Amino acid sequence: EDGYDLWLRFRPLTGTALAGAEARLSAIATTAPEGLAAAELSRGLSGLLGRAVPIGTEGPLLVGTGDDPAIRALRLDLSDLGPDGYVIRTIGPRTVLAAQGGTGLLYGAYHLLRLAQTGARLDTLNIREVPRIERRILNHWDNLDRYVERGYAGQSIWDWHRLPDWHDPRYEDYARANASIGINGTVLNNVNANATILTAPYLDKVAALADIFRPYGIRVYLTARFSAPKEIGGLPHADPLDPAVAAWWGAKVAEIYARIPDFGGFLVKANSEGQPGPQDYGRTHADGANMLADALAPHGGIVMWRAFVYSDEVPDDRAKQAYAEFVPLDGSFRDNVLVQVKNGPIDFQPREPFHPLFGAMPKTKLMMEFQITKEYLGFATHLAYLAPMYKEALDADTFRPARGSTVARVADGSLDGHGLSAMAGVANIGSDRNWSGSTFDQANWYAYGRLAWNHGLSSEAIAREWIAASFSPDPAVLEPVLAMMLPSHQAVVDYMTPLGLHHLMGRGHHYGPGPWVDGGPRADWTSVYFHRATKDGIGFDRTRRGSDAVSQYAGPVADRFDKVETTPPDLLLWFHHLRWDRKLSTGRTVWAELLHRYGRGIAAVDDMITRWQGLEGRIDAARFKEVSTFLAIQRQEAQWWRDASVAYWQSINGLPLPPGEAPPPYPLSHYQSLSFPFAPGDGR
Ligand code: BDP
C-alpha cells in the first residue's frame, strides 16, 4: 500500500460483507455494456469479490437509463434527477441503478461501490441522490513550470512539456478519483495566472486533458489573466470597456471552444495581490467580469470572479475590504458570473468567522471557496481533518434575510433562487505517489468532494466512509481513526492560533510560528497587525467601537459578535481586544485561557499518537510508518508553536506563567532566529 489507490482500493471483502455483495452484485446486466459506469462497477466489484465480475445481459445488478427497456418496465421516476442524479433500489432479488444518462450512472456506480466497500447492507436499498451544487470544482494553484503554489505534495501533476502527446496514466486516475466523489470540474492553473496558458500550443495541451476527463463528467476551466490581451494579444491595454479588448476575448474564447466544446469557463483573480484587473483602467469588478462573461455566454461558459481582493493601501481593517468593494455591485453581474468567496473574510486561517458577503449579495450568485491544501494548517505533515471546518462555515446562519438562512443555502443558490451554483476547493494534489502529501490529507480531498455534492452530510459520516474505504470497515480500526480525525482541526487551531487569533505564521511561506512578524511592504502582511498585542491586552477590536467589521453582518449576528459574552470563545480575539487579565466564561483569564488552549492542542496530538500506536499490525506497514512519523513531527511542531508563542507574548505582557505551565525552553530570540529557506511558499 503506498496510498496511490486513495479510497478506491477495493481489496477483497470477507464475511457478511462478501456474502452480501455476492448475493446482490455478482454480475452486471446492462444494455450499454460499453458505458463507463458498467466498466467501473466491474472493476471495483472484481476487486471486492476477488474474481472477475462480468458485464452482460444477465445478472442481479441492473444498470441503465430510462431508454433501457428493462429500466423503463420498472416505472421508476427519473424525471427530477437532472444529468448527475441517480436512483439505487432493491427490487426483489435485483439491485437497480438508474439515471437519465451516463454521468448519473457513473455517480451511482461509485455510490454502490462505496456501499459495498464499506460493508453496508445491500438488500434494502432505496437511494435517490441529486447534488445540491451544480459545479463542484477543484482549483489547482499550479504554475506552468510545475511549481504548485502552496502545494505540499510534490510538483504539479500536469506534465505540460510532454502534453499533448504523452498521456500520463495519472490523468485518468485523477479523473476517476474525482468522479468517485462527485467533483465535475477542474481549474488547471494558478489564480496568479500566466497568460501563456491561453496560447494555441497550450490550448492543445489543455484539450488533451479535457478529452481524458470528459468521460468522467469533468470539465476543464482555466484562469484568465486579465492583462492577456496585452501580453499575448498585442493590444496596447486590457480595458474591459474597449470593444477591441472585448473582441480579442471573444475570439480567444471561440478558439478555446473549437478545441474543447464543453470548456467550463474562466476563474479570475483580479486587482488582488498585484494581479492585473479592471480597476487598472478605472473600471469595476463587474465591468471586468461581465466583459468575459459576454465572451463566454454564446458557448455556455461561466466566469468565477474572485472576491479575495484587497487594495494596496492598507485600510483600517483588511477583513472589511471584500464586502466594501463587492456589495455595491450586487445585481450588476451577468447571469453566467459567479462571485467566488473564501469561507472567511481574511484568508484561509485555521479558523475564521464566515465571510460577511454570504447573504449580503442576494442578487448575485455567490460560490464558496475552501482551501483543501493546508497552507495555514501545518502543511501535509500535520493531521487536520477539515470537514468540521468546512461545515462550520456552511452551517453558519447569516440571518439574511432571516433566521435559517445558512451560508450553505446561499452557496447552493436555493436561498435566492439562483439556478446556477458552484463550489471551489483549492486542491492538495501533486506528483507525490500518494497524491496529497500524506495519507490523512487524502481525507480532505474526499471530504471536500462529498460536501460539494451534499453539504448536509456530517463530518463524522464522511470520515466513516473515508476510513472504511481507505483502511478498513473493521470497528477496531474505524473507531480509533475516527477519534483521531474528528477533533484534529480544533487541535491545530488550539496549538497555533487559539481563541480567534489569526495570521501569526512565518512570513511568506506560512510555516511555523511568527507572531513577531512586523515591517515589510504591507502592514496587513504582518502578524502584529492582526494580533495587536500590547502590555495591556491582545486581539483585534472589530466591534462597533473598533473597526466595526461586525456591522457587515446581519443585525443579530453583529450583535452577537459585538459583545464579549456572546462571541464564541473560538472567535474571541478575532472580534475583541481584551485585557490579559480579563476573566472569561471559562473561569480563566485571557492569558490563562491561551496557555490552556496551547496545552489542550498538544495533548490532543498526544492522544492521536496513542490511538495510532494502538493500530500497529492492523494497518499496512508503509502507511503506518508514514503516519507515525508525521504525527511525531506534528507533536514537535505543536510544542514549537506553543513555546515560541508563549515566549513572544511574555515579551509583550511581562506576565508570569499560570501555575503548572512550563516555561519555553529557549529565549524568544532563538525562535525568532529560525529560518526556513526551503519551506514551500508562493513560488514568487
Ligand atoms: C493566499 C496565498 C496566496 C494565494 C492567495 C489567493 O498565500 O499564495 O495566491 O491566497 O488566494 O492564501 O489568491
Image (cartoon, rainbow, N blue to C red):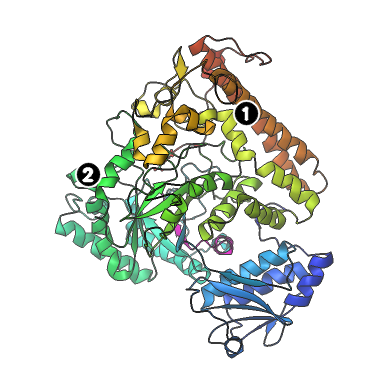
- Residue at 53% across / 79% down in the picture? 78
The image quadrant of residue 29 is bottom right
Observer-nearest of 360 and 216: 360
Residue at which label 1 appears: 638
Residue 571 located left or right of residue 642: left
Task: State which tag comes first along the sequence, 1 or 2.
Answer: 2
How many residues crowd around disc 2 within 10 Å: few (fewer than 14), some, or many (20 or more)? some
- Residue at 47% across / 53% down in the picture? 408
Q: Amino acid at mark 1?
A: Ala
How many residues crowd around disc 1 within 10 Å: few (fewer than 14), some, or many (20 or more)? many
**Location of residue 674 in the rendering, given as x and y in whole percent from the top left corner:** 54, 21
Task: Kindly tell me whether residue 206 is visible in this rendering.
Answer: yes
Bounds of the magenta segment: 174-190
Label 1 vs label 2: CA separation? 42 Å
- Residue at 51% across / 34% down in the picture? 568
**Location of residue 314 in the rendering, given as x and y in whole percent from the top left corner:** 30, 29
- Does residue 158 belong to the magenta stretch? no
In the image, residue 653 above or below residue 549: above
Residue 324 located left or right of residue 574: left
Residue at which label 2 appears: 279
- Residue at 64% across / 30% down in the picture? 601
In the image, residue 159 above or below residue 355: below
**Location of residue 250 in the rendering, given as x and y in whole percent from the top left corner:** 24, 64
Task: Kindly tell me whether residue 272 is visible in this rendering.
Answer: no
| Image quarter where ligand 1 lies | top left
In the image, residue 263 above or below residue 306: below
In the image, residue 200 above or below residue 155: below
| Mark 1 secondary-structure assignment | helix
| Mark 2 secondary-structure assignment | helix
Q: Amino acid at mark 2?
A: Gln
Residue 423 located left or right of residue 291: right
